Image: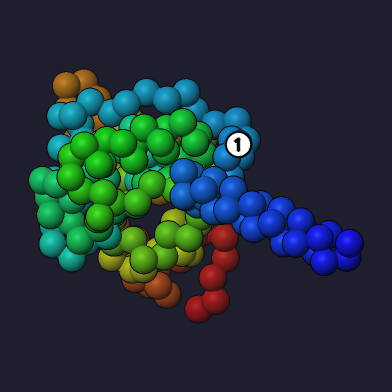
């Protein structure tokens, strides 16, 4: 009797492990349910704006592109497909968008170089990025600004469609068919420019 119970427990445990593995495979980087309500309504970035964002950031070989709020995956996919980025990562809080992006990457034949993660972008690890792209809101950009300055390496390029970073002024601003594209570069740590950017973000740095 005890042996039968032990076998049943083992079978049940293996079934649960298998189910968890399948859920993780279907939804990498997160659970099978939405983490929380999205901060923005999903609106895809027009292709011509995506092109402008990747061009102003000079995306090319060796780059690691992170798209925070990646939607259907068009920015990470184009970054590796056309601009030859080494790899790209899309992060989205909505698992439906993640699944859609994964399907689009497979259709484009770049699923080996693009990952889509169901995560909260404010909690995600982004330190290996050389380029970060955004299409959020000004309030969210400002909220995200300290994380960008603290987590990203000096020289990392940041591009935002439509929304600025408040008092952190961009290096360049483009207008594409009436839509703005803003471009920044993470300053060298410890420089006056970096300290000013951190201070504007409400953070202090040691000299």
Of all residues, the one furthest to the right in this rendering is: 1
Residue 207, image x, y percentages: 50, 78
Nearer the observer, 65 or 195: 65
Establish if 179 lies above or below 188. above
- Classify mark 1: helix, strand or loop: loop
- Quarter of the image holding residue 181? top left
Residue 56, image x, y percentages: 16, 46
Q: Is residue 170 left or right of residue 121?
A: left
- Residue at 57%, 53% (x, y): give it: 18
Nearer the observer, 23 or 169: 23
Please state the total of marks drawn on the protein image: 1
Residue 3 is at least partly visible in this image: yes
- Residue at 18%, 29% (x, y): give it: 47
- Residue at 16%, 21% (x, y): give it: 177
Of all residues, the one furthest to the top in this rendering is: 178
- Residue at 46%, 43% (x, y): give it: 26
Nearer the observer, 70 or 29: 29
Q: Is residue 161 left or right of residue 9?
A: left
């Amino acid at each position: 009797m005890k042996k039968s119970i032990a076998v049943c427990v083992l079978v049940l445990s293996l079934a649960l492990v298998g189910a968890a593995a399948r859920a993780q495979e279907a939804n990498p980087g997160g659970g099978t349910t939405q983490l929380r309500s999205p901060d923005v309504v999903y609106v895809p970035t027009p292709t011509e704006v995506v092109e402008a964002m990747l061009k102003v950031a000079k995306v090319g070989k060796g780059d690691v592109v992170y798209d925070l709020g990646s939607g259907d995956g068009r920015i990470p996919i184009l970054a590796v497909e056309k601009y030859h980025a080494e790899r790209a990562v899309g992060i989205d809080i909505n698992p439906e968008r993640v699944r859609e992006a994964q399907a689009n990457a497979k259709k484009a034949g770049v699923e080996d170089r693009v990952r889509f993660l169901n995560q909260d972008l404010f909690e995600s690890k982004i330190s290996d990025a050389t380029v970060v792209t955004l299409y959020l809101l000004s309030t969210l950009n400002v909220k995200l600004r300290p994380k960008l300055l603290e987590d990203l390496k000096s020289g990392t390029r940041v591009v935002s469609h439509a929304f600025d970073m408040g008092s952190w002024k961009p290096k360049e601003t483009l207008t594409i068919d009436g839509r703005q594209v803003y471009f920044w570069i993470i300053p060298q740590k410890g420089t006056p420019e970096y300290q000013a950017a951190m201070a504007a973000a409400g953070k202090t740095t040691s000299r």
